[in-house]
Image: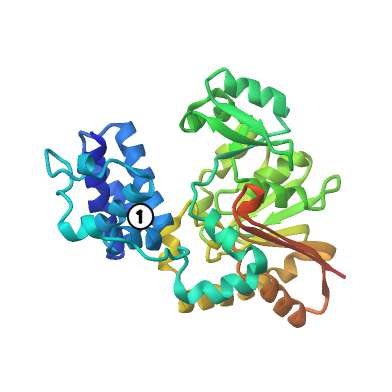
Amino acid sequence: MTPAARMAAAIGVLDEILTGSPAEQALLRWSRTSRFAGSGDRAALRDLVFGALRRRDSYAALGGALTGRGLMIGHARAESLPMARLFSGEGHAPAALTEAEAAHVPTDLPDDLPDWLRPDWSAALGSRAAEVAAAMTLRAPVWLRVNLARTDPAGAMASLAAEGVETQRSDLLPSALRVTANERAVARSKAYRAGLVELQDLSPQLACAELPLVPRISVLDYCAGGGGKTLAIGARQPDARLTAHDAFPARMADLPARAARAGLRVAVTDKAKGSFDLVVADVPCSGSGTWRRTPDAKWRLDRPRLDGLVATQAEILDEVVPSVAPGGCLAYMTCSVLSAENGDQVASFLARQPAFRLAGDQLWTPLTGGDGFYLAMLRRG
C-alpha cells in the first residue's frame, strides 16, 4: 500500500471508531476484509489510527473537522507532509482537498483531554497537568522486565541483541529494559520464548519493586488478569507462595504456561481462601495512565463510567480485607492518575477500615518514562 492508500484506510477506520466502535475491533475488521495488506501495512495503519486518537481534538482543529478525513488532514498538517500527493484522489488516495479544507487556518489547539475531565486532571496533577497531558499524546515506549530468576539484565540484553532487538536499561530499575529498536521482534525472540524477559511497562515494574518481600512470603494477586504482577513478584522472590485470583478466570488462562516458562509455580483460583502476608489489588480503573496505549479509551470515558469504577474499587478493597493477615500488607494499585481512584479512594477505605494504616503511596506518570500508575501500601495492625 502507498502512504496515500494507508491514509485512506485510516480515514475509514477512524470514522468507524468515531461512531462508537472500539479501536481494536475496527482495526481487526479492516484486516479481515483487506487480505491484500501485509504486516507492514497493518502496523502503519495502526500507527496512523492510534496517533490520531491520541491527538484527536488537536488534529480535528488542524483538519477542520472531527471526522476520519479531518483527523488525517490534521495529521498531515502537524507532520508537514505533502498534502497534494497524499490527498490527490488518484488510485487509492483520499479525494483532493476542497477549497475550504485547503484554506482552513486553525486557531489555538486544544490539549487533547475531554472537557469534562480537565478539572479532575488538573486537581490530581497540579503543576504537572499540562506536561502529562502532552506526554499522553506521544507513543508509549515498549518496556521489558528481566526475569531475574532466569538471567541477569546483561544476559537478557545480549540474547535480545543477537536477534536484532536493541535495549537499554532504565536508570530507575536495572532489571527494566526499554526497547530501542525492532520492538515487533520481541514476541518471537528466544529470550521471550525462554522466559528471560516479559513485556511489562516500567511503572508497574517500579511498583512491584516497592512491595515488601520476605522469605516464604504468601502472596495473593487478587485482580490478577494475565498475571504480570504475580510473575514480577515471583521473579524477585522465587520462594514466594503465589496465588492468582480473578473474578473472570478466563483472563488467567495463559498464566500457568507463562509461569512455567518463567520457572515459577503459581496457584490459580477463582475463590481466594485463607489469609496472606501480601495482597495485591490492581483494581479495574479508568486506565487514564495508559491512554498512550489505549487512546480511544480516553474519549469513551465519562463521569457515570468513572463513578461506577470508583464504586467497584471500593467494593473490591472491602472484599479483600479478610484475606490480609494481621501485620500483613494490602497493595492497592491502579493504572490511573486521577485522585478519585487513587488518594481519595484510599482515604475513604481507611475511614471505613480503621485496622489499616497508610504506610506510603506513590504516583508515577509518563514523565518518568512509564505509564501513569498508582501504588498505596496499606498495613494491617
Please report the residue visible at 41 percent of the width from the left and 67 percent of the height from the top: 300
> Position of 261 compared to 343: left or right?
left
Q: Is residue 274 visible?
A: no
Nearest the eye: 3 or 307: 3
Q: What is the residue that sits farthest to the left in this orientation? A: 90
Residue 178: x %, y % from top left: 61, 36
Please report the residue visible at 42 percent of the width from the left and 65 percent of the height from the top: 108
Question: Hey, what amino acid is under mark 1?
Answer: Ala
> Position of 238 compared to 182: left or right?
right
Residue 379: x %, y % from top left: 82, 66
| Residue identifier under label 1 | 23
Please report the residue visible at 66 percent of the width from the left and 50 percent of the height from the top: 368
> Position of 38 compared to 328: left or right?
left
Residue 378: x %, y % from top left: 79, 66
Please report the residue visible at 83 percent of the width from the left and 46 percent of the height from the top: 216
Residue 10: x %, y % from top left: 27, 48
- For the C terminus, the image quarter is bottom right
